[in-house]
């Protein structure tokens, strides 16, 4: 991935929506901790449907944002699709109902909340079914058609990417998401997202890929003179912790193997050039 120059003065994103990972596909779970609305549990409401109840961000003074007739129709179609998802094991029917939301939204000029959430759920459903071509298609659609929502939906995007960590296209999803956030003027969110990617790579022990990611992150947490930027202390703390984790893991593995593995150099996480 090309080097991204993060702007420390960029405004932080507003976290307005979460997306959990439990249930059959982590699909209709309840993100406020009050219960589990898995794919077959029959729950008819979860916090993901209406954000985190931030009346000042999603809804404004008049309740739900975009409360005109067209948006109300989309909302009803979306909730009906979720009811179908709760009541049937016919995944083709569920997919059809969420695609109908996107089709109906496509008849208008704006792309909004209900299309975003329908598209997000279609990504999750197809991923659970192993339909990787459809996963890539709907994920790309999420980033392009709903690019104007990515800032306020940063939390949902992060949770979605975490749920796709085993996808063969996970690296591409992260790269395109990072670029979308930067293009949208939210470089601070891109920095937070790349930290999540680094944690996932460490968890998967993908050391060769993790090294350059950590160096890109570290480069964007330095001053113009090349020193660590004190204003990015929390990010630097996590970066150094990940670097130490890599070294501990490497030496722990190396100690269990005879020559020549022990004499091999550890991952060059401190000397990777920034590309």
Image (cartoon, rainbow, N blue to C red):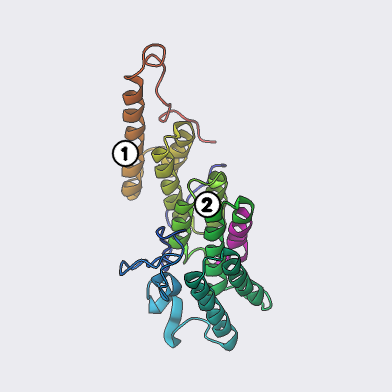
Q: Is residue 112 shown to the viewer in this render?
A: yes
Residue 25 falls inside the magenta stretch: no
**Most prominent secondary structure in the magenta stretch?**
helix
User: Which residue matches tag 1?
Assistant: 241
Label 1 vs 2, first from the N-terminus: 2
Q: Secondary structure at mark 2?
A: helix
Q: Is residue 85 left or right of residue 95?
A: left
Residue 24 position, x and y percent, is 45, 59
* 75 or 221: nearer the viewer: 75
Range of residues picked out in magenta: 136-148
Q: Which mark is residue 178?
A: 2
In the shown orientation, is residue 243 left or right of residue 69?
left
Q: Residue at x 57, y 51 (%)?
A: 130
Expressed as whole percent of the image width and height from the top left, the position of residue 121 reads 52, 64
Mark 2 nearby-residue class (10 Å; few <14, some 14–19, many ≥20): many
Identify whether 73 is placed above or below 203. below
Find out whether residue 142 is within the magenta segment: yes
Q: Estimate the x, y position of residue 153 in percent, counting from the top left.
A: 47, 65
Rendered image: mark on residue 180: none
In this orientation, which residue lies closer to the viewer: 94 or 48? 94
Q: Residue at x 55, y 69 (%)?
A: 118
- Residue 78, how many percent across, how many down? 54, 76
Q: Tell me the quarter of the image containing the N terminus.
A: top right
Dividing the picture into quadrants, the one containing residue 184 is bottom right
Q: Is residue 7 visible?
A: no
* The C terminus: image quadrant: top right
Question: Quick one: which residue is furthest to the front in this view?
Answer: 89
Gap in angstroms between the C-alphas marked 1 and 2: 22 Å
């Amino acid at each position: 991935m090309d080097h991204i120059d993060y702007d420390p003065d960029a405004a932080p994103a507003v976290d307005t929506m979460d997306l959990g990972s439990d249930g059959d596909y982590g699909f209709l779970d309840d993100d406020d901790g009050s219960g589990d609305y898995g794919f077959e549990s029959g729950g008819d409401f979860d916090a993901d449907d209406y954000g985190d109840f931030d009346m000042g961000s999603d809804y404004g003074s008049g309740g739900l944002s975009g409360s005109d007739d067209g948006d109300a129709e989309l909302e009803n179609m979306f909730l009906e699709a979720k009811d179908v998802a709760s009541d049937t094991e016919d995944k083709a029917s569920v997919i059809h109902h969420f695609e109908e939301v996107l089709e109906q939204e496509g008849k208008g000029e704006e792309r909004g909340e209900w299309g975003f959430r329908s598209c997000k759920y279609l990504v999750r459903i197809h991923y659970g079914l192993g339909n990787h071509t459809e996963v890539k298609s709907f994920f790309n659609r999420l980033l392009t058609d709903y690019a104007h929502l990515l800032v306020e939906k940063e939390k949902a995007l992060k949770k979605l990417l975490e749920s796709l960590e085993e996808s063969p296209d996970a690296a591409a999803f992260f790269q395109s998401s990072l670029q979308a956030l930067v293009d949208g003027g939210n470089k601070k969110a891109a920095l937070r997202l790349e930290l999540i990617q680094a944690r996932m790579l460490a968890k998967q022990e993908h050391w060769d890929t993790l090294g350059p990611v950590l160096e890109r992150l570290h480069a964007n947490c330095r001053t113009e003179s090349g020193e660590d930027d004190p204003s990015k202390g929390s990010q630097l703390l996590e970066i150094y912790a990940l670097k130490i984790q890599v070294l501990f893991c490497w030496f722990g593995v190396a100690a269990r193997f005879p020559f020549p593995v022990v004499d091999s150099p550890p991952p060059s996480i401190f000397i990777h050039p920034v590309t």
